[in-house]
Amino acid sequence: MSGNAQTAVTELWQQYWPACPPVGYKLRDPYRDLWVRFHSLPESKRYAQDENEYAVVLERYITVLDELFAGGDVYVIIPVWATEAEVPPFQPDAGYWQTLLVEDDPDPEFRTYCHLFVARRPWRYGCLDELLRDIADDKVAGVLITDTQMRRIHHPYDGGADVFLATSEERDRTRDRHADWLSRHPSGL
């Protein structure tokens, strides 16, 4: 990712999500009015145990992703967590964006860094199936998928997805379309 592209992506993030760094689990609190959580399996089951359940998990992820991003490009933001500030090598199709110090501990051995890499891809139904399955199996964590204006964020995790929409009205419409996928817990978790 060139310096100009890094700057442009950073400026977009700051324009729409200034209260939080690009770390999925930190977005919910400052953007609760734009947030909805969908569970991947019925009855809030967390992990798929067979291919039929994997099909449900992928269908739920992809249905929402397709509603958000069909016909456009997306940024796939992939974190690499480390105890070192040095940027690790990564996939050739994803460019380095930035490094965040997530846990600042006086002891360097306990500091945690999040190195963010970004890939721009045309959104196509099913184009991220392998990555989404790895997320569902908790092999990969912290991925953010956004439109190229960063107005909408899909943050899949093992068990579901946190989705952040441009307005609370859009959030409500998306939530209502998939009401069967919501938690029964009053907090939405």
Image (spheres, helix red, strand yellow):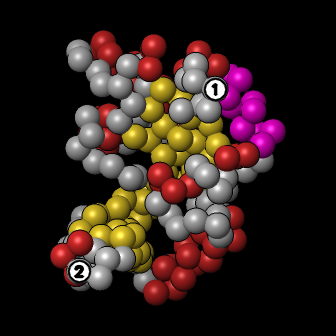
Circle 2: residue type: Asp
Question: Residue 25's x, y, as percent?
Answer: 47, 52
14 relative to 186, above or below: below
As for residue 172 lying within the magenta part, the answer is yes
Which one is nearer the viewer's eye here, 7 or 164?
Answer: 164
142 relative to 20, above or below: above
Q: Is residue 140 left or right of residue 39?
A: left
Q: Is residue 88 visible?
A: no
Could you give the CA–CA distance between mark 2 and mark 1, rounded to whole angstroms?
Answer: 39 Å
Which residue is labeled 1 in the image? 186
- How crowded pointer 2 is (Cα within 10 Å; few <14, some 14-19, many 20+) is rated as few
> Which residues lie in the magenta part?
168-178
As for residue 72 lying within the magenta part, the answer is no
Question: Residue 56's x, y, as percent?
Answer: 40, 18
Circle 1: residue type: Pro
- How crowded pointer 1 is (Cα within 10 Å; few <14, some 14-19, many 20+) is rated as few
65 relative to 79, above or below: above
Q: Residue at x 75, y 30 (%)?
A: 173
Which one is nearer the viewer's eye here, 102 or 157?
Answer: 102
Which one is nearer the viewer's eye here, 28 or 135?
Answer: 28
Q: Is residue 158 left or right of residue 34?
A: left
Which label number is shown at residue 107?
2
> Of helix, strand and loop, which one carries label 2?
loop
